[in-house]
Amino acid sequence: MDQLPYTSAETDLNTQAVASLVRHAIIKLDADPGTARQYLINAETLLEPVKIPSRWEGLAPWQAKRVNAYIDNNLADPVTLGDLAKLVRLSKSHFSRGFKRSFGECFQRFLKRKRVERAQTLMATARLRLCDVACATGFADQSHFSRAFLQITGATPGRWRRQTLEHVTVIYPT
């Protein structure tokens, strides 16, 4: 919840100032519309809520580093928001909010993208079947892997592999 921008005494002073500005604007309305307008603009400024920046902008650097390392080391296993929150000693809701602020995307999207990146590395460097790549990167099955891969890269795993391997020059020892 946002903090209140003023204490009670400050609110009273602010209210009195706005009332005074409005009274002056009413008095000047017919004789000097420009001055009346300026009084009203000042009153409006006093009525605008004050945005107090949050002191907590995301995960602490040590938390972000620990979370990233944990995800990288456990991509083949189920990784849950609760596990990561516990790892950095935060509640799930605080962790989720901090994760998005620190990494720029929600936890599930980040995890999916990391798994797809690992799958791309495996497909480019090892001759594994797609179902084996799916299992090695934490996807439930090949269908789940294919849907996620398509969503992240815009290509199916098979098409991506063919296009990537076409551009790889194989050098055989002589």
Image (spheres, rainbow, N blue to C red):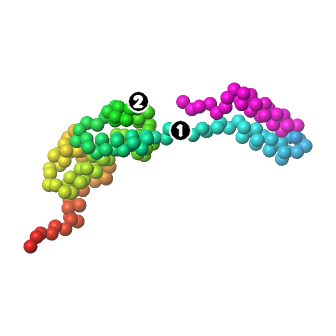
Q: Residue at x 31, y 53 (%)?
A: 154
Which residue corresponds to mark 1?
A: 55
Q: Amino acid at mark 2?
A: Ser
Could you tell me which quadrant the C terminus lies in?
A: bottom left
Is disc 2 placed on a helix, strand or loop? Answer: loop
Residue 16 image-quadrant placement: top right
Residue at the disc numbered 2: 91
Quadrant in the picture for residue 53: top right
Q: Quadrant of the N terminus?
A: top right
Left/right of residue 19 with respect to residue 6 in the rendered view:
right
What is the C-alpha distance between the residues marked 2 and 1? Answer: 17 Å
Asked if residue 147 lies in the magenta stretch, the reply is no
Are the residues tagged 2 and 1 within 8 Å (C-beta)?
A: no
Relative to the observer, which residue lies in front, 90 or 157?
90
- Going by the image, does 24 lie left or right of 70? right
Q: Residue furthest bottom?
A: 174
Q: Is residue 81 visible?
A: no
Q: Please provide the residue range marked out in magenta.
A: 1-27
Residue drawn at x 24%, y 56% as measured from the top left? 160
Could you say which quadrant of the image residue 10 lies in? Answer: top right
Residue under the image location 83 percent in, 42 percent down: 36
